[in-house]
Amino acid sequence: MKEINNHTKKQFQSKFNDFRAPFPEDGWDRIEASLNAASKTKVLRRRWFVGAAAAVAALIGGGILFMQQPALQIDKEVTEVKPTSTESTEEIQTNENQSATFAQSKTNENVQNARTFVKQPKGTIQPIVISTEKPLPTFSENKKESVEEIERREKELVISEIKKEDIKEKDRLIREFAESGQKNYFAMEQESVKSSKQNKTLLALGGRGGLTAFQKTVNAPMSLRSASLANEGQSEKKELYTLSGVRDVSSNIGDNISEMEHAQPVSVGVTVSKEIFDNLYIETGLMYTYLYSSVKNRNIGLENKENQEIHYLGVPFNVNYNIFSFHRLNVYAAMGVMLEKDIYGTRKYRSLAVNEYSEGVNSAWESEEIKQKNLQLSVNAGLGISLPVYKNLNLYGKIGGAYYFDAKNEYKTIYSDRKVLLDLNVGLRVEF
Amino acid sequence: MDESQLIIACKKQNRNAQKALYEQYASKMMGVCLRYCKNDEAARDLLHDGFIQVFTQISSYSGKGSFEGWLRRIFVNLVLENYRQEKKKKKIMEDFGISESEIMCESADSIFDVEDISRERLLELIQELPNGYRTVFNLFIFEDMSHKEIATRLGINEAASRSQYSRAKALLQRKVQSILQRNKALWEK
């Protein structure tokens, strides 16, 4: 059996040993086109990764520089309570002076009262001391004290009374100051506690990149303009710019190779989130997205290329919920919608014709501005993590996907040809 | 530019070198593709895909062994990959156009003589074989693989590989004999 098999092998191998078969003429062209498409995708992916890495590095660096500026001590601000002790001291001084003046006048009055004489019988006049409201120092009947001494004593008495009052006043003021300071302190404490319990606001700056591109290679001619929405009465083949003397493309449809490619969308944006309940945030903002697409149609005698760039501006509405926290890491779920509208678009195209009568006819790139008529609506969901990096600055990353509804727009993009897109969001958030 | 220089340039993705290498080996590889495929169109597609793989993976060629042998392995691996994928999609249906009894009438142990038949005609007969038979036959006869290796690569058991080879050989033998008899009859006329 083994010998028979060996014999059979030798027979067949000798028959086909140097077998060479004719290969297709355009074989190399097809291979070259495929290799070019593959290398372009690699370059696009590499550029996206480099761009995303640069954006994240710039965000982190900018965020750190921003946070190194003098911080706003909002909740730790100390309200300065003006000390009233100096004022009270001045007042006391003034009061003291006033009191001294008053005392002086009072003393004088008292002295005058004290000099009231009572009319005596004929022959003798004796001064009689009449008691005043304030108790006056008792005078020895036997001692004749001078008016000055009386005044001095009264003055001292009044001053001592005033001083007592001043001290009491001082104590009262100091007590009040201390109490008011404590009140303010407690008020601030309550204020900060209250503010910490107030709803948080987050400001985020981030970038988003699609994780999947789109490529299609078919035999039928393709264009980036939707055939169903092209000018009425004109078939799609007229989109392929034929030159005179060149065979009609559609007559050799089997030889046609068409390649369409949509690059991954790249977005950057700013969002604001507000906490409405515990761990539940609503978010909105502004998002810019860049879309790039290209088509190459190749046939015997004709090759045409189209490139398209569309710039979108969108407003997202999301709901984020913190699922759980692990040490300093927060895990959250997000879902929402986004409405986008193109703000600027260009389409470039050219044809290259090669026929038996000419070496090759190159036409220059022509370009036109394009507009999508309708808004693009999408829904998205994802899972993210957030990690604090410096004080109120957090780094976040989210992986998710979005579904793009058919907007029935004229120009094809990755949104129309690939409904579901996976994406990666990264960025920085600041808490207020 | 000799072959080693071409290979070095191809590793640097030099398009001219890649084109030169393609033109040097395309006809031989097309012959390989025609043996594994059921028609010319499928063979052209396999040739295209095979060379894409060659230029993508050329950096893994270390220079040991012949470059042509390395090329053939790339193509054979691609055939096996396609076979596995089609098997997953259940696209491979064993076509038992002739009954088992008819096959078993042929002696599996008889010597198979293909001297008197042209290469092109023999190629057509190989292409007419069912997919599974054709793949096993090619791997056993032209790639010198054992049934154990074939079974591993195709995801079948060894007994299935042996039976598919035997059936392929019997079918070919029957058809070759039929052609030779017809030619002999014509010659005698």
Image: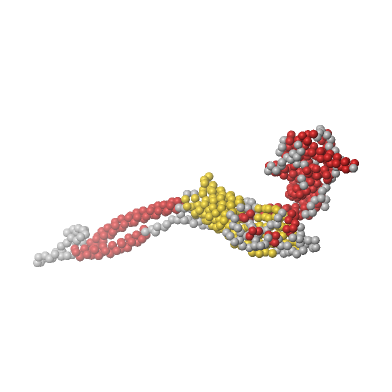
Could you tell me which residue is drawn at 56 percent across and 55 percent down?
A338
Which quadrant of the view contains residue A142? bottom left
The image position of residue A143, as x and y in percent, is 19, 60
Could you tell me which residue is drawn at 82 percent across and 38 percent down?
B173
The image position of residue B28, as x and y in percent, is 81, 47
Judged left or right of residue B93, residue A80 is left
The image position of residue B13, as x and y in percent, is 75, 52
Furthest residue in direction front, as rendered: B189
The image position of residue A223, as x and y in percent, is 68, 58
Could you tell me which residue is drawn at 17 percent across and 65 percent down?
A116
**B134 or B13: which is nearer to us?**
B134
**A126 or A308: which is nearer to us?**
A308
Judged left or right of residue A286, residue B1 is right
Could you tell me which residue is drawn at 81 percent across and 44 percent down?
B123
**A91 or B25: which is nearer to us?**
B25
Q: Quadrant of the C terminus of chain B?
A: top right
**A308 or A372: which is nearer to us?**
A372
Q: Is residue A389 visible?
A: no
Which quadrant of the view contains residue B16? bottom right
